[in-house]
């Protein structure tokens, strides 16, 4: 799932480089380097502004040779593919806060065979200071991506094919939005034209995007509403538009209509 490459052992860092510094040849210098347990292996983990990389630590042989000349497989994820990071804790039944810190969980979303697949990678380390340092740095990088939404207006058409839209949103989509710390304002439409009428009046400037969960009719109505609102805000004649003003917000489409199995990407 993650891109791997064959590398030979590298010497440990002598210092923590400043942010943005690049090594000779344009290779990005690490921001943090440390040891975490991933699965059943102790791994050398390196974080830069663009990538999170790890490789298993080879134990020394009886003769003191750590086999540094033998190749090992390094795995990595691009920071742009990480949509959330959380501190991993063990809690007792009924405990909602606190708990024993176990490490960090990184949530990744990758496109595979025209589908988006999310997964979680656990980086285990019992040190509070170590984990909090890494967590803060990871969050800072993720918050630095300029196009990531913080707040979304969501429209759900409950009457889409076999009434699947509501189930698709609350069971599959909403948990991911919560995981990514995205605030949502959800409207379950009650009649045809409901979304259009709301888009004419709601305070769109408070959102970073609009999401539609439904079929072709819902998508068309919301796209129409966004374009119509853009013309209204620009003072354009909405009855005859030769060159329409671009809608200020992006539209995300999560198909839940009759043909969603063939259109979901």
Image (spheres, rainbow, N blue to C red):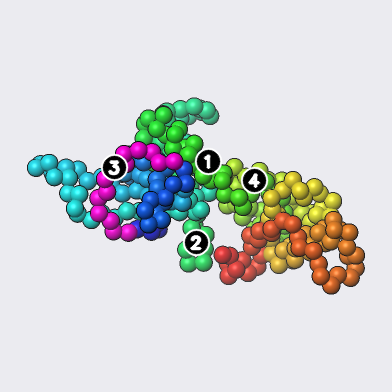
Residue drawn at (69%, 50%) of the image: 208
Q: Nearer the viewer, residue 105 or 46?
A: 46
**Dot 2 or dot 1, earlier in sequence:** 2
Does the CB distance between marks 1 and 3 fall below 8 Å?
Answer: no
- In the rendered structure, the answer to whether residue 219 lies left or right of residue 103 reads right
Element marked by disc 4: loop
User: Distance from label 1 to label 3 (Cα)?
Assistant: 24 Å
User: Distance from label 1 to label 4 (Cα)?
Assistant: 14 Å
Give the labeled residue for mark 4.
Answer: 150
Residue drawn at (53%, 49%) of the image: 83
Magenta residues (range): 5-18
Crowdedness near tag 2: few (<14), some (14–19) or many (≥20) residues, C-alpha within 10 Å: few
In the rendered image, residue 205 lying in the magenta stretch gets the answer: no
**Dot 4 or dot 2, earlier in sequence:** 2
User: Distance from label 4 to label 2 (Cα)?
Assistant: 22 Å
Element marked by disc 3: loop
Residue 187 horizontal/vertical position (percent): 74, 50
Query: In the image as oriented, which residue stretches furthest toward the front?
Result: 24
Of the 4 image quadrants, the one containing the N terminus is: bottom left
Task: Considering the whole magenta stretch, tell me its main secondary structure.
Answer: loop
Residue drawn at (61%, 50%) of the image: 146
Give the labeled residue for mark 1.
Answer: 140
Element marked by disc 2: strand
Q: Nearer the viewer, mark 2 or mark 1?
A: 1
The vertical placement of 18 against 213, above or below, is: above
**Dot 4 or dot 3, earlier in sequence:** 3
**Dot 1 or dot 3, earlier in sequence:** 3
Give the labeled residue for mark 3.
Answer: 12
Q: Nearer the viewer, mark 1 or mark 4?
A: 1
Give the labeled residue for mark 2.
Answer: 111
């Amino acid at each position: 799932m993650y891109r791997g490459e064959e590398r030979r052992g590298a010497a440990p860092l002598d210092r923590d480089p400043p942010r943005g510094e690049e090594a000779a040849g344009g290779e990005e210098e690490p921001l943090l380097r440390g040891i975490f347990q991933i699965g059943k292996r102790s791994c050398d983990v390196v974080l830069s502004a663009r990538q999170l990389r790890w490789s298993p630590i080879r134990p020394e042989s009886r003769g003191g040779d750590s086999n540094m000349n033998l190749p090992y497989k390094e795995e990595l994820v691009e920071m742009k593919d990480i949509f959330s990071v959380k501190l991993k804790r063990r809690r007792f039944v009924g405990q909602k806060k606190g708990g024993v810190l176990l490490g960090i969980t990184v949530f990744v979303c990758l496109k595979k065979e025209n589908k988006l697949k999310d997964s979680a990678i656990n980086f285990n380390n019992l040190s509070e200071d170590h984990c909090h340092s890494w967590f803060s740095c990871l969050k800072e990088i993720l918050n630095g991506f300029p196009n990531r939404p913080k707040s979304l207006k969501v429209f759900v058409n409950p009457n889409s094919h076999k009434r699947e839209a509501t189930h698709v949103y609350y069971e599959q989509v909403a948990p991911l939005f919560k995981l990514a710390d995205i605030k949502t304002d959800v409207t379950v439409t009650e009649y045809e034209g409901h979304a259009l009428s709301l888009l004419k009046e709601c305070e769109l400037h408070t959102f970073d995007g609009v999401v539609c969960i439904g079929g072709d009719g819902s998508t068309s109505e919301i796209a129409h509403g966004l374009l119509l609102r853009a013309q209204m805000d620009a003072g354009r004649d909405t009855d005859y538009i030769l060159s329409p003003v671009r809608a200020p917000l992006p539209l995300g489409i999560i198909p839940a209509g009759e043909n969603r199995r063939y259109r979901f990407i």
